[in-house]
Image (cartoon, helix red, strand yellow):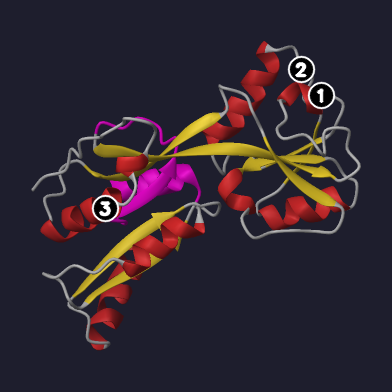
Amino acid sequence: LLHADRAIHLARAAHNGCDNVLLVGHAPHADPAWISTLLTIRLPLFPRLKVRLMTHFAIELVRSVVSNELHLALVTAPPFDGKLTTVPYAETQLCAVLPEAHQAGHNEQVRLRDLSSDDWILFPRSVNAAIYDGITETAAKEGIPTRQAHEIITAQEAFYLVSEGAGVAILPKPSVIGLEAGGVVVVPLFDSSLSFETSLIMRRDDDSKLVNDFARTFLRKYVRNFGPGRQMQLPLSA
């Protein structure tokens, strides 16, 4: 069914005058700036390129790239897979979504310990296992009781629940960009173990010039500024 769906995308693109279609996946909490970059890339050798975006959770993105259902994907903390080339390009921090009246609501940053008395609202493990495990394992190491109240799929749900007094939310920072709710504040979460690399992934054996040129063009925008002094080599075929 997935291959049939891909064939439909390709057929529609051909009908609309596109010579090439690139299927790119991303997580629901991807930074809008990354998505904008994907949509604005122009390749001189492929002037009629069509980019089609698909949203999946992290494990599904990895599986889809490995099985060649997606050409590329943007994944935070992807699990290791020998079939993939993985190039980190951004650091994804977490943040806390708090009621304005919370005792840490006016801090410049918070730690998990500051939230030890609250019920936690989290994305479930199925959304991104690395982030979920990072939160729960850090809490366990520091002896912080995890009082998980709700699992949500979208940041909008989290904002609503926080505004209703149902707890505090711990979310990837990109997911809260542009969101707001009455009586709710967003504060950066500062714990060294709760920072995650976001990477572009592609099949290691993919020698398509289109895929490699697109990946390099995207990465050039970000890797130069990925941490002080970090000039990353792009292990992509020419």
The amino acid marked with disc number 3 is Asn
The amino acid marked with disc number 2 is Ile
**Marks 3/2: CA–CA distance:** 41 Å
Residue 210: percent from the left, percent from the top?
16, 61
Reading the image, the residue beneath label 2 is 144
Left or right: 21 as drawn, with respect to 124: left
Left or right: 99 as drawn, with respect to 43: right
**103 falls in the magenta region:** no
- Secondary structure found at label 1: loop
Quadrant into which the N terminus falls: bottom left
Labels 3 and 1: the sequence-earlier one: 3
Characterize the local packing of mark 3: few (<14), some (14-19) or many (20 or more) Cα atoms within 10 angstroms. some
Reading the image, the residue beneath label 3 is 68
The amino acid marked with disc number 1 is Ser
Q: Nearer the viewer, mark 3 or mark 1?
A: 1
Residue bounds of the magenta highlight: 57-82
Whether residues under marks 3 and 1 lie with C-beta atoms below 8 angstroms apart, the answer is no
Labels 3 and 2: the sequence-earlier one: 3
